[in-house]
Image: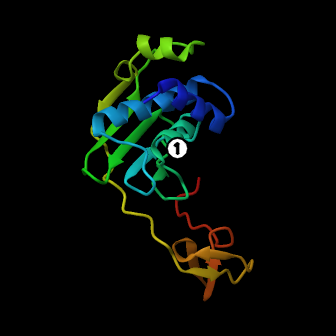
Amino acid sequence: MDVNKEWQKCIDFHGHECKGLLIGFLASIYASEILGLTREKDEENVCISECDACPVDAIQVMLGCTLGRGNLLFHMTGKTAFSFYSRKTGRSVRLVLKDGVPDFVDDMAEYCASYPPSALFEAKDAKISVPERARIFRSYICDECGEKAGDMWMRMQDGKRLCLDCAAKYDRFRV
């Protein structure tokens, strides 16, 4: 792999260089080393990200995990942590950014030589089992707003089929 060429692809997709993009880039490289991942055209690679920030753009470029394919999912914890899965092998790893990551430097090759991915991340067992493959859901028209939504996101209330935006929220523990 030409590290500089792949890094440039990430920058082009994301729009600029930043420490967050570099974190996702190095997480992708480390997950690839551990699990034997390569960029796939379908759902063979899966990533569950615990943040919705810059690192995710590099993961999309490097491993082909995207929202549209259903193999990029978010489990929002606010942590810089990523669980990677290989459907081909059934193996997985959760990478958690260690404390004290050095500040971003200008020379990508120098940075990678100085700080291998294993120095930046703690590799742990994935907490969540590999998600099932993406499904296609039947869509229905909301009786309130007239907009179409998938059946997993519709609610029945007072005999009406309502989307999540129109359905009354049910929370018995409001404060």
Amino acid tagged 1: Gln
Where on the picture, by quarter, is residue 53?
Answer: top right
Where on the picture, by quarter, is residue 15?
Answer: top right
Judged from the image, the secondary structure of the residue bearing numbered disc 1 is helix
Q: As drawn, is 149 to the left or to the right of 117?
A: right
- Residue located beneath label 1 in the image: 60
Above or below residue 168? Residue 9 is above
Where on the picture, by quarter, is residue 153?
Answer: bottom right
Estimate the x, y position of residue 84 in percent, counting from the top left: 37, 43
Q: Is residue 62 visible?
A: yes
Crowding near the residue tagged with mark 1, few <14, some 14–19, many ≥20 C-alpha atoms within 10 Å: many
Q: Nearer the viewer, residue 4 or 122?
A: 4
Q: Nearer the viewer, residue 4 or 67?
A: 4
* Residue occupying the far right of the picture: 145
Above or below residue 39? Residue 16 is above
Q: Quadrant of the N terminus?
A: top left
The residue located at (49%, 15%) in the rendering is 109
Q: Is residue 101 visible?
A: no
The residue located at (55%, 58%) in the rendering is 68
Tell me which colouring the rendered structure shows: rainbow
Estimate the x, y position of residue 22 in percent, counting from the top left: 53, 26
Q: As drawn, is 98 to the left or to the right of 139?
A: left
Above or below residue 9? Residue 140 is below
Estimate the x, y position of residue 164 in percent, counting from the top left: 62, 69
The residue located at (24%, 50%) in the rendering is 89
Estimate the x, y position of residue 116 in percent, counting from the top left: 38, 18
The image shows a total of numbered marks equal to 1
Q: Nearer the viewer, residue 140 or 155?
A: 140
